[in-house]
């Protein structure tokens, strides 16, 4: 005993140092344990919150894309049902298309009288409970909502979009969806934890499950949503410790059957009608800590080393997570280019960081939606990705490119001239790619460019100006690229006013049919008329075609206007026939943009059939320039129209672009000679050319009409060379429909006699 006491006394300082070291080690170990415990809680909480946010973002993008399709389906069924006065016809005709062509597993159309049409044409009953889930008087047009637990088909849930015919709701388009394995794999790839991930709708139904954990405690818990919001408790009398809301994101600890669970949740942004929820048992937080608890204090040094290694690894782990999050927020998932927000931030830094001159470009593909409709979204995505790749390759390391939407991109580059050359080169490469993959629709780029100035380095203003220049591009140009200039401001304002008023103008009937007569010069009698559009506002002011037609051709509204004019003329012919007038054919102009619609022939036939219009009373008038660039496709359209016994006029023949070789291949019925020939008709050469064109038309077995006839001498010349028909101010300028009827139309004697 004394020896021990002596040893301790002689080595007091050593023991004190050892005790201090032990105390330091213990404190360090305790600090390590406490820190590790707290970091584990924070880390797991952040991981769970990130898991659900990323999954909600992925799910939201999927639902947004499919929601647009559901809205399109509802609009299409409404339009076709109006044209054919039959909801059943529209539903059975279009639903199969939305299952076979688009991404819906099954499609239905539910009418107000509890009828449900399936995509295979089958009519199935609808229960009152199902109708109550689907139908809502508050659903506005051009919207969609999520439904689940419907008990129909094999889909997990449905996107429902109301279908309106005018102001009347005629039903709902239902697109059935299942989450594809690719979505689950994509969402699971972002999950940092082995937790259970649920997609839960507003009624507490589990719409889908993405599970990485073996724990099946909540796997089939269908009323999990009700439990967590306090509405229902499964096999438990214990009070709830927390809940969550569909309108917010967050993290809660909940108590269930003696266990504590962490729940992270995020509302899906586009609908706010469902949540992504991640569930993890709280005991699992400390699995790593429990594994280390049995280690002896003698390996403290190793444990401390492990602490530092763990911190070091967590640092890099955090960096990796930040990189994943940055890629999700800053880079477009399809093309790898910048997102618009990150483009704005990066471009602002570049423009504010130096005084160099830059230019902003907005680039897209004219009529890209037709590529998706004709060749599918997958082929369209291939073209979008190639366009992004080519733009990225053409810019420098300190220049930027971002995806604006769909096939539209924004760029910030140092040199505008180089950008123009790059756009031309990219356009040619895209055309070559389209040919290689059998995309027959023309792939044509257009672009608007705005340049920085000493006073203007605001990226959003420059983007707006470049976008305005893009919209103002004439699509008929060989190189559709336009620079923004301040002088464009007035034109842009006028364009915006026209675009803002176009829909209301059509709804209020401001687009009027004016008619110009066509005369038989051999018999001196009315032979027909040409329908021309005039925009007369409610206050009586007129907007002339040269003001609004370029805008409509650029934004695509001309397609709707052309079909509106065709419908109005068909209605006029039907009314005149019922009133006993002698009917004459009326030609209706068809724009080049309208002819690019893949369903053009079907839509024309739909208008004619809806009005019960005889084919010989309507002539479809096309300019010969419509055939340049894609003659084969246009000839195919003409042949299909001719097979339906439609009459076709070729307008402006000889206006400077004619190709006799092309004319011989085009099927048509009437050749309209451009007015320019009358300017030279007094000369021997001009008269000979005019006479030979008439002879050529007669030899081809088609009728011939000369435009721009203004004098009796011109009329007499036509009579002498054998031209049968004429049109021009000699007979009348274009006049309103009622005035034309009063001035030129005659009652049918046989109709009077029968009356």
Image: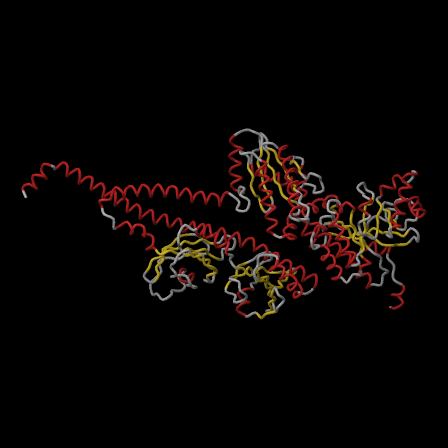
In the rendered image of this protein, does residue 470 appear above or below residue 357?
below
Q: Position of residue 263 (x, y in %)?
A: 39, 55
On the rendered image, what quadrant is the N terminus found in?
top left
Q: Nearer the viewer, residue 668 or 728?
A: 668
Colour scheme in use: secondary structure
On the image, which quarter does residue 121 sit in?
bottom right
* Residue shown at 71% from the left, 57% from the top: 603
On the image, which quarter does residue 118 sit in?
bottom right
- Count the labels in the image: 0
Compared across the picture, whether 141 is left or right of 551 comes to left
Compared across the picture, whether 506 is left or right of 65 comes to right
Q: Position of residue 544 (x, y in %)?
A: 75, 45
Compared across the picture, whether 388 is left or right of 5 comes to right
On the rendered image, what quadrant is the C terminus found in?
bottom right
Q: Position of residue 476 (x, y in %)?
A: 72, 42
Q: Position of residue 533 (x, y in %)?
A: 76, 50
On the image, which quarter does residue 138 sit in?
bottom right
In the rendered image of this protein, does residue 314 appear above or below residue 207?
above
The residue at the far front in this view is 436
In the rendered image of this protein, does residue 300 appear above or below residue 454?
below
In the rendered image of this protein, does residue 82 appear above or below residue 334?
below
């Amino acid at each position: 005993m004394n020896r021990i006491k002596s040893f301790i006394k002689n080595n007091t300082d050593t023991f004190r140092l050892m005790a201090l070291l032990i105390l330091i080690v213990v404190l360090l170990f305790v600090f390590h344990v406490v820190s590790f415990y707290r970091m584990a809680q924070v880390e797991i909480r952040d991981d769970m919150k990130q898991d659900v946010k990323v999954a909600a973002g992925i799910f939201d993008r999927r639902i947004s894309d499919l929601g647009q399709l559901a809205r399109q389906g509802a609009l299409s069924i409404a339009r076709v049902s109006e044209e054919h006065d039959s909801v059943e016809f529209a539903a059975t005709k279009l639903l199969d298309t939305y299952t076979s062509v688009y991404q819906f597993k099954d499609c239905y159309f539910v009418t107000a009288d509890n009828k449900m049409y399936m995509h295979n044409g089958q009519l199935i009953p609808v229960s009152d409970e199902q109708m109550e889930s689907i139908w809502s008087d508050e659903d506005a047009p051009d919207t969609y909502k999520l439904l689940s637990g419907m008990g129909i088909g094999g889909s997990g849930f449905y996107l429902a979009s109301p279908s309106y015919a005018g102001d009347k709701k005629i039903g709902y388009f239902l697109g059935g969806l299942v989450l594809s394995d690719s979505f689950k794999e994509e969402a699971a790839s972002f999950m940092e934890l082995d937790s259970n991930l649920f997609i839960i709708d507003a009624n507490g139904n589990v719409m889908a499950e993405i599970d990485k954990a073996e724990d099946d405690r909540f796997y089939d818990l269908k009323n999990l949503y009700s439990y967590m919001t306090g509405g229902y408790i499964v096999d438990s009398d214990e009070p709830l410790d927390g809940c969550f809301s569909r309108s917010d994101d967050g993290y809660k600890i909940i108590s269930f059957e003696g266990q504590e669970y962490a729940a992270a949740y995020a509302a899906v942004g586009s609908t706010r009608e469902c949540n992504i929820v991640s569930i993890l048992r709280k005991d699992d937080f400390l699995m790593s800590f429990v594994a280390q608890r049995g280690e002896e204090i003698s390996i403290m040094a190793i444990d401390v080393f492990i602490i530092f290694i763990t911190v070091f690894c967590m640092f890099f782990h955090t960096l990796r997570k930040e990189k994943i999050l940055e890629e999700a927020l800053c880079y477009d998932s399809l093309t790898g280019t910048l997102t618009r927000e990150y483009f704005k931030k990066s471009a602002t830094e570049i423009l504010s960081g130096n005084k160099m001159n830059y230019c902003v470009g907005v680039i897209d593909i004219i009529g890209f939606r037709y590529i998706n409709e004709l060749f599918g979204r997958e082929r369209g995505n291939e073209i979008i990705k190639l366009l992004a790749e080519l733009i990225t390759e053409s810019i420098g390391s300190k220049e930027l490119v971002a995806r604006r939407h769909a096939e539209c991109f924004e760029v910030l580059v140092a040199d505008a001239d180089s950008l123009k050359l790059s756009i031309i080169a990219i356009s040619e490469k895209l055309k070559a790619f389209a040919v290689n993959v059998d995309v027959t629709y023309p792939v044509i780029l257009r672009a608007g460019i705005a340049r920085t100035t000493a006073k203007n380095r605001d990226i959003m203003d420059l983007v707006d100006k470049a976008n305005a220049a893009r919209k103002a591009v004439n699509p008929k140009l060989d190189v559709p690229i336009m620079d923004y200039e301040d002088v464009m401001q007035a034109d842009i304002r006028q364009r915006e006013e026209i675009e803002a008023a176009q829909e209301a103008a059509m709804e209020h009937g401001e687009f009027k049919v004016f008619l110009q007569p066509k005369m038989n010069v051999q018999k001196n009698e009315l032979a027909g008329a040409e329908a021309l559009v005039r925009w007369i506002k409610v206050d009586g002011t007129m907007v002339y075609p040269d003001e609004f037609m370029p805008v409509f051709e650029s934004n695509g509204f001309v397609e709707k206007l052309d079909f509106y004019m065709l419908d109005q003329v068909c209605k006029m012919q039907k009314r005149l026939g019922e009133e006993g007038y002698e009917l004459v054919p009326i030609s209706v102009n068809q724009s080049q943009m309208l002819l690019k619609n893949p369903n053009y022939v079907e839509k024309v036939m739909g208008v004619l059939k809806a009005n019960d219009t005889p084919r010989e009373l309507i002539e479809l008038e096309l300019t010969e320039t419509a055939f340049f660039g894609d003659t084969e496709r246009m000839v195919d359209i003409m042949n299909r129209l001719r097979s339906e016994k439609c009459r076709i006029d070729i307008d402006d023949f000889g206006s400077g672009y004619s190709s006799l070789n092309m004319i011989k291949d085009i099927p048509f019925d009437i050749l309209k000679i451009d007015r320019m020939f009358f300017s030279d008709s007094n000369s021997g050469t001009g008269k000979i050319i005019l006479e030979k064109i008439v002879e050529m038309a007669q030899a081809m077995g088609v009728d011939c009409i000369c435009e721009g006839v203004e004098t009796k001498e011109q009329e007499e010349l036509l009579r002498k060379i054998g031209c049968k028909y004429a049109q021009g101010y000699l007979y009348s300028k274009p006049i309103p429909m009622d005035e034309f009827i009063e001035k030129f139309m005659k009652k049918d004697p046989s109709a009077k006699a029968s009356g």
